[in-house]
Amino acid sequence: MFLIYNYLSGGNLERFIQERSKRPVSWRKLHKIAMDVARALAYMHDECVPRILHRDVKPNNILLDNECNAYLSDFGLARLLRNSETHATTDVAGTFGYVAPEYAMTCRVSDKADVYSFGVVLLELISDKKALDPSFSPYGNGFNIVTWAVKLIQRGRVREFFIEGLWEKAPHDDLIQFLNLAVQCTAESVSSRPTMKNVVRCLRELRPPSY
């Protein structure tokens, strides 16, 4: 048996983020990547039968073509859910830094765990930090990109979160809403996180004019 993929010459999102300093920052391009991944997850969670939980959403598993169209890949850890099921109980799988806290603690995984992982990806997409960035070490264990984002928002220093140049090139209100959406996706309370369908709707409202 063979698993066949299209060849995507843009590499993965992890490499795109690492090499971003070599190319101009485009709010339109970042938004497009976020929207593509959100739509893929919304389809898996709400339209597939049975529903699909990816369980390993991270930049390394998001592939790009030459036009920065994004494709969610690597379904090796995916779990299927019947429509009557709200969650699955399973051994914890995924990548440290992207795994939802309730999943790590209880082994109960739902679509909201994918929402959490997606939120972490959004935070990485618009900042110069990794999920578990070495610069967070002075803050102690448990400090990650999520707590860093919340800290800056609470202190009224949101501008410091964004990669260099993005604040000058994109509408400030849209960037702040994008950041708030990412933080909402990574809320500790599962019920406070939006569904991926709602995430797609929110991202549509932030669509850049030149889209």
Image (tube, rainbow, N blue to C red):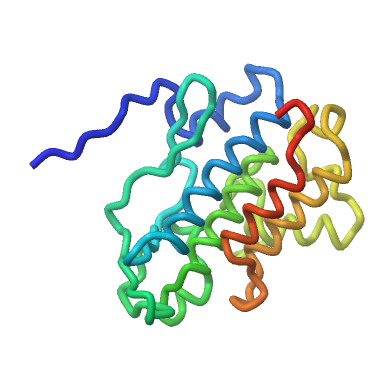
Give me the residue at 42% from left, 43% from top.
Answer: 72
Furthest residue to the left? Answer: 1
Q: Quadrant location of the C terminus?
A: top right
Q: Taking 25 as reference, is 80 left or right?
A: left
Q: Which of 84 and 77 is in front in this view?
A: 84
Give me the residue at 32% from left, 66% from top.
Answer: 50
Q: Is residue 131 above or below residue 81?
A: above
Give me the residue at 45% from left, 25% from top.
Answer: 65
Q: Taking 63 as reference, is 135 left or right?
A: right
Give me the residue at 63% from left, 48% from top.
Answer: 122
Q: Is residue 117 something that shows in the picture?
A: yes
User: Where does the image place residue 70, in percent across and percent down from the top left?
Assistant: 49, 35
Q: Is residue 137 something that shows in the picture?
A: no
Q: Which of 62 and 160 is in front in this view?
A: 62
User: Where does the image place residue 207, in percent across and percent down from the top left?
Assistant: 73, 39
Furthest residue to the right? Answer: 156
Q: In which quarter of the image is residue 202?
A: bottom right
User: Where does the image place residue 176, in percent across and percent down from the top left?
Assistant: 82, 49
Q: Taking 210 as reference, is 155 left or right?
A: right
Tag count: 0
User: Where does the image place residue 6, in percent across and percent down from the top left?
Assistant: 31, 28
Q: Quadrant location of the N terminus?
A: top left
Q: Nearer the viewer, residue 178 or 159?
A: 178
Q: In which quarter of the image is residue 31?
A: top right
